[in-house]
Amino acid sequence: MDARSMRLLELDKVLTMLKDKCVTTMGSARVEALVPAIDRHQVKLWQSQTREAVTLLGRAEPALSGLVDISSEAIRAGKGGILEPLQLFRIARFLDASAALKRLLGTLDKDSYLALTAQSLLHLPDLSASLRRAVDEEGNVLDTASPELRSIRRKLDNERSRLRDKLDSMVKSPTIQKYLQEPLVTQRGERYCLPVKSECRGQVPGVVHDQSASGATLFIEPMAVVDINNGITQLQRQEQAEVQRILRELSNQVGSYSEDLVLAVESAGEADFIIARGKLALAMDAMEPEISEGKEMEIVRGRHPLLPAKEVVPSTINLGKDFNALVITGPNTGGKTVTLKTVGLLCLMAQAGLWLPADKGTVVPVYTEVFADIGDEQSIEQSLSTFSSHMTNIVGIIESAGPQSLVLLDELGAGTDPTEGAALAISILEHLRGAGCSLVATTHYSELKAYAWTEDGVENASVEFDVETLRPTYRLLIGTPGKSNAFEIATRLGLQQEIVQRARSLLGGDVRRTEDMLAALEASRVEAEKKLVSARNQLREANATREQYEMRLQKLEAKQDEIIEAARQKANELVRSARLRADELLTELRQAQSENVDELARRVREDLKPTQTVRKQQQAPGEKPDPSKLKPGQTVKVASLDKTGNLLSIGANEAQVQVGIMKINVALDDLRLIREAEQKKTVERHLTKAVRSELPLDLDLRGITVEEAILQVDKYLDAALLAGYEQVSLIHGKGTGALGRGLQDYLKTHPAVQGFRYGGAGEGGSGVTVVSLKK
């Protein structure tokens, strides 16, 4: 990428914004080294990484402050060096932050880039605990580092306390106090001393460690405390030795993870760098651009990221589809240069893996080079607006630009004679187009407007200017060439009318016709835009009305389903209650009958005697059985009762038959054999009645898979056929509709199904399939 062009387009300022979002020095270093990629796969990877960061930030804000760069400490420990307490504490902080980040990134999809990066982060709780137990953030080695260190320091405290007490008693002693320069204890070279007057040297026996500058005071360690001081010195040496042993041991532990720690630092920096891109995307209210496979570019309502969000006017611009060159015209201060910079900067940002402050639908290609010649006409220091300066830059661009280059030229051909400048500008455009470049240029020249109007592959554009307010609107209008509006602006500013009219008369006929054409085009555009706004408002109102009625319909359907579901549950509850009560009554009846069944049978026989004659006359046709062929368990009919029963036992003249819940004795002549077909019907009738008493008319399949539902439906339909049902309902719910569709595909092939349909009003709608069974 051309470094000068990236600087002109102010990519460095955007990267400074990105760097501010980094927490670690490692992440900041990656921003400083960031250069837009020119490989499409690399750009897509960087964009997907930013997407992962935005997803992560939607869940939680990672705590990265502890991820300090400990590479040098880890390398030193790996080589056997002894680390200082503060360095060990930095490593402990890093380990704790690394473990926390590893846990957080582990919640992402396991194949995501950030989750893979987390694999190199470290979770070493034992080492972290050892370091935090031994050192603190101020670089002190703590008493908890080892039992030996705690014991030595306790002894030191005791000896120092004993020393202070001894010296305090000497200072307060009237005998010694008169020899002291001041009644206090001082320290010289880690030895506790008394300030003794030099002339009283012999009155206070001890070791002289120092004297004052004037020589009037000697700092004497009294003999009475020499042994105590010696003991303290010895303990201090032991303390220092133990501290060194602890530091060496901890450094060795760190050194054993030296390579892993260096790799973890790299991964932490990479994660911070990616997360910073996500933070910047959210801060700019940016979105992920689509990366074009070819040269098509479409920026939808793009905003320059360095301008205040509330003030910037979005621009929509496209290139590379119907045309590869765009000529933007319009008055000064109209925003042409801002548009040019916005296009170039957004393309560079996309290739750097950054999201763009634009709307959904934005598509950008991957350029191998982005060239810009953008001059500030008010810059005296750099003189970038002079013709020679522009030409120098353009010469370099022409030599390097190729088919996958984006070229941005500001005020092309300016700074020289207008006629020659316009001709040269057209020639430069033709050459760059011939090289296959994508091209955006700004100009004042009418010749370039005409060139763009007549040339295939080149399109006009303008930045709107409000003549009434003499202020630009900064709206980019593609397809419409811009006017300089010099006469209108001069008139609004108070220039005499005759001067303006004379100036108009001096224009050539072609120029006037061009200006008139532009005015007509502008009027047509304004009118069309008003109609478009009106149509959009009407469409918006229609959509709002449609959404309102759809919501009402959804509420009604939901209410209807609730009512139906409540009624179904109520009915099921009533059925369950009735069944429970029937079971209780049946149990009571069986108990009562078993206790007095003989008495009941006798009474039944007595009651039936008056009707036996009539019964015999009305007996159903049937074959009287041969007593020798009757067998227990056989189904027979009692002619006098017109009831079928089960033969229990056979005697000489009578048999015992189970009729319903009663056992009765019946004369052999009163029995009739039942044909096989009739017996089968009787069994089926009893079986159908039993099945119906237990089988509901609907089957609830909600919350299970299609495969599980098919197994249940298969058994349920068999039972429904056995019960003699002609129609049943399968409740599968609405949801995604997958369960309902799967069941209906299965019903199409079921041999017992005559037809099926979704439920109607009051039947559950599309949440229920009503099945008709074959008779």
Image: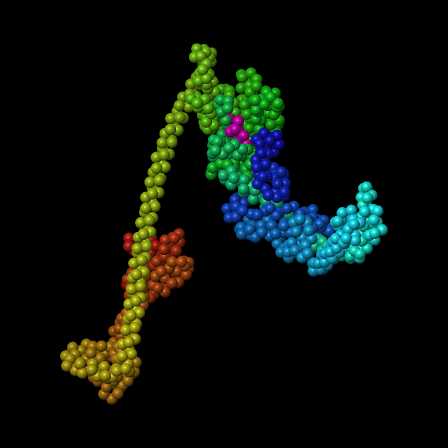
Give whichever of 497, 37 is nearer the camera.
497
Left or right, 494 with respect to 433, comes to left
**Residue 445 in picture, x, y percent from top left:** 51, 20
For residue 225, which quarter of the picture? bottom right
Q: Quadrant of the C terminus?
A: bottom left
319 above or below 117?
above
Numbered label tally = 0
In this rendering, position of residue 122 left or right of residue 716: right
| Boundaries of the magenta span | 336-344
Residue 365 x/y as whole percent: 53, 36
Q: Position of residue 203 (x, y in %)?
A: 83, 52
Residue 511: image x %, image y %? 46, 16
Q: Going by the picture, which residue comes out furthest to the bottom?
A: 652
Instruction: Judge by depth and name the residue closer to the eye, 149 or 108.
Output: 149
148 sits left or right of 30 in the view = right
Q: Is residue 337 magenta?
A: yes
Using the rendered image of the protein, determine whether residue 554 is visible from the camera's viewpoint: yes
Whether residue 245 is visible here, answered yes or no, is no
Q: Which residue is pictured at 84% across the width and 49% down the height?
A: 201
Q: Which residue lies at the image location 34% right of the left edge and 37% below the top edge?
A: 541
The extreme right residue here reads: 202
Which residue is at a point 31% across and 58% down the rendered structure image? 566
Give the vertical position of 196 relative to 288 (above or below). Answer: below
Assign the magenta stretch its main secondary structure.
Answer: helix
Within the magenta stretch, is there residue 678? no
Q: Is residue 95 left or right of residue 51?
A: right
Name the one closer to the observer, 195 or 296.
195
